[in-house]
Amino acid sequence: MINRLAWAGLAAALSIAACASPTEGPALERTFQPRPGTSTDFTFQSEGQTLSGIFDTPTDGEAEALIIFVHGYGPTDIRNRPSFRELRSRFNALGIATALWDKPGQGQSEGTFDINQSVYASAREVVDAAAHFRAVRAPGAERIGIWGISRAGWIAPIAMSEDDDLSFWISVSGTTAEDNFPYLLLSNLPFEGGTEEEAAALGAAWREGCRLYRTGGSYDAYRQVMQPLIDNAYITRMRGGWQTRAQYEASQKSCSGGTCTRTDNDMCAYVFIEEFGAMLSSLDVDTLAVFGERDLNIDWRKTHELYEATLGSNPQASLAVEVFPGVDHNINPSETGSLREMQTMGTASKPERFFTVQEEWLESVVLIQGAREED
């Protein structure tokens, strides 16, 4: 594993070598030369494992930039599933190369698949992949950005905070710092036999239970407040078992010792990234954020506000936001946006604007503006 200081030194060395003039020393030779207009297998090392992916090259064999695709939650199979195929094709047509790989233990990648893999481990894969592409002088490696959906809303900022040369980001259905699970459960309740009024009441109970937990409330008081949630079959089936007295008191004791920094103040959801706002504010990157107006998986309005307050307030960054009406978490047309509808949905056709807004942004912000900056 390359630590942050080692990575900074490696990135600087590669950058210097890539830009060196003949009088300064030889430039690095391109050792990865995929055929123009093809999808080529590649491998790279991360955390001692060989990960396997696909690299798509524009038809002329050159590229103005390279986009790394970062998956959301769940297993992957990039060679036997669509795996962002239309987006990759459209980006290639703009003169942008694309790359994606299977998670550890999936497809042809080594390792053991862990559906709950740490977002920091996933971000390390992105950093290692970017370093690999620069080292082999892959097409477009002079300007690398990230495209990521859902869970990648945590992964991409971590990777960009460790690699200053990752210069742009397309965030689709991005996240706030904390786990989205409470929002997902309550927003989907009206489509699982409940009502909006019931969801609001359960949300209030959840918040009060969190307040009791964080302020030293007794287990009995906590249990009484949370009883409506415990009695709800859908919530308990989705969430799993509830804390016993011993578990509650032990967790509460550790919380009073300072570990509550990993628990948000609202509904005691797990915080994936501490000081996430500060991390986002520090990113000098161009960002396009895409949201679905009927997204019941993540609280997109809260994420939108976070992005505006951080990336949108950074004079060294830029933020464009597109909210698509009538679509779900995956930006598919949906009547409800609910998990139930998503799970029973067949082949869905994304709005054409989903593709064109990204193409237009890449052309104007990444390609044209990037070329001007180089001049």
Image (cartoon, grey):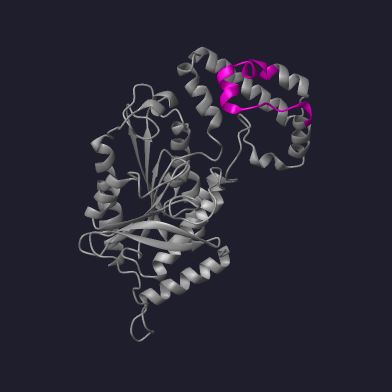
Residue 164 visible somewhere in the drawing: no
Q: Locate the C terminus and report the quarter of the image it occupies.
A: bottom left
Q: Is residue 55 above or below residue 296?
A: below
The answer to whether 111 appears left or right of 304 in the picture is: right
Picture quarter containing residue 31? bottom left
Question: Residue at horizontal 65%, vertical 19%?
Answer: 230
Question: Residue at horizontal 44%, vertical 33%?
Answer: 300
Dominant secondary structure, magenta? helix
Front residue of 29 and 168 = 29
**Residue 132 pos. (x, y %):** 43, 66
| Bounds of the magenta segment | 225-246
Q: What is the total number of numbered labels drawn onto the structure image? A: 0
**Residue 244 pos. (x, y %):** 75, 27
Question: Residue at horizontal 43%, vertical 72%?
Answer: 14
Q: Locate the N terminus and report the quarter of the image it occupies.
A: bottom right
Q: Is residue 179 above or below residue 141?
A: above
Is residue 241 covered in magenta? yes
Identity of the residue furthest to the bottom in this view: 23
**Residue 90 pos. (x, y %):** 24, 49
Question: Residue at horizontal 25%, vertical 47%?
Answer: 360
Residue 56 visible somewhere in the drawing: yes
Picture quarter containing residue 95? bottom left
Identity of the residue furthest to the left in this view: 60
Front residue of 315 and 192 = 192
**Residue 35 pos. (x, y %):** 25, 65
